[in-house]
Image (cartoon, rainbow, N blue to C red):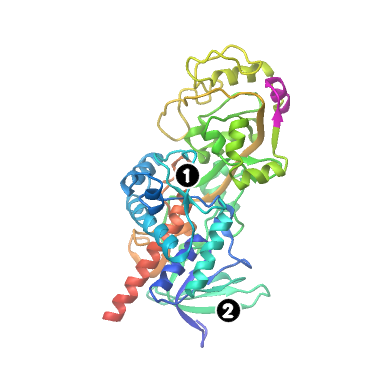
Amino acid sequence: MPPDTPAVPVAIVGAGACGQVAAILLRDAGIDCVLLERDDAPRGSTALSSGFVPAAGTAVQREAGVVDDSAAFARDIRAKAHGTAAPELVDAFVAAIAPAIDRLRRDHGVSFELLDGFLYPGHSVRRMHALPERTGAALLAALDAAAQRAGAVLLTRARVVELWCDDAQRMIGVGFERPDGRLEHLGCEALLLACNGFGGNPAMVREWLPEMRDAVFGGHVGNDGSAIAWGRGLGARLADLGGYQGHGSWAVPQGVLITWAPMTEGGIQVNAHGRRFHDETQGYSEAAVRVLEQPGGIAWNVFDAPLRALARGFPDFRDAEAAGAVHDASDVTALAALIGCDATVLADTLASVAPPGDAGDAGDAGEAGEAGDVGEAGDVGDGRHAGAEPRPARRFTRRLAPPYCAVRVTGALFHTQGGLDVDARCRVLDADGRPMPNLLAAGGAARGVSGNAVWGYLSGNGLLSAIAGGAIAAGTIARTFENMETT
């Protein structure tokens, strides 16, 4: 490091949810820290998300009468990833997330409440926690305010470009670039990489996520893979680089996210031919791949007025309506004209998603087929989806009724779930699996709990890893400093 470099006990690269939570809890422990943020204000993947955080056994759940615990949450994570999620991280994250949510709410004024009305795919009970605004931007703003009140120092427009270490691989500081090109340095006793994944790095996406090489990237440009590049340079081990969160509901040409809530509660996706092609309830992440496999990489979300009312509870949907992404169709003929498909084919599709025993019609639909049938040959009518074991076909509880709503969508890549390999204390591991002396990673920089494929992503895994990982990393650093003081 250059001589006379200022130093701080803990440097945190990235001021998203992960970095902010770590900073709050470090300040609670009386440890000074500096957050280094590349943008002019904290944004990142957190601000672009819906801001929904899954947690089990929280005070919020108990107040709502929801019975849940970390064991049930861990089972849901493992089931979604078909047992491929890192078991030590699953156990650590589900154990850490509820205390973190409770502490942020009780001690720091982060007003979490339980998301009601429906279950996100893969969760056995209601465990999504959100702020009243229902946005990731609101969540990040609340965490940032709490960190500043706690005394954390935030340096914005400080893009970290260098990590410094000694001969023993102990981190001693970072170099960060200012907007005018000046390079400044900051020393540290511990370094937490709470920064980015690699979804915004086309070369890395082509290497590790080839099925998404042509997909829209709906994440933050800061996800340039720098944490992975630094880790490679330091000899750190990488893991689960094939894991990521996709989304099968990115409105085109508007370029906005459409909430998956209507799909969860009875909406369907059809391709340009008016046929269903997958089970929408399996998850919005793997839906991205299925949508991209369709003609032109395009699908249509189809739902009706009650589901539109549900969706209007989410700010992103209201924004999409304002942008003109949501189209109306009075009947099946009008809906087919909107999509550009054969009306008879579309009518058969709508009829086939009727609940068992429903002999009604779907507007001007034809004869009803078997409930839960999925599209044409070669799709997933057998209940299968790419990369996973067989699953039962979807069952419907009611028939979609005119007037209909439709949104033209494609599949998008949001954020990656692989990165630096870490242990249950969020310490970065070297090539031999040994913890590096004082380098930690969490959130987008580190391996998550979604396994090594898109279908392993359980709703909320990104913010789970960020907030639980930030809390765990802060605890690891605090214990390390305590041990140093007593020896």
Give the image location of residue 65, x and y in percent. 38, 45
Give the image location of residue 135, x and y in percent. 57, 52
Identify the amino acid type marked 1: Ser
Residue under the image location 49 percent in, 39 percent down: 117
Element at label 1: loop
Give the image location of residue 236, x and y in percent. 41, 62
- The vertical placement of 429 against 479, above or below, is above
Q: Which residues are magenta?
A: 328-338
- The vertical placement of 369 against 275, above or below, is above
Category of crowding for the residue at label 1, using alpha-carbon neighbours closer than 10 angstroms: few (below 14), some (14–19), many (at least 20): many
Is 475 left, or right, of 350 in this rendering? left
Task: List the residue tagged with mark 2.
Answer: 184
Q: Is residue 332 magenta?
A: yes
Q: Which mark is residue 459?
A: 1
In the picture, the quarter occupied by the C terminus is bottom left
Q: Is residue 187 magenta?
A: no
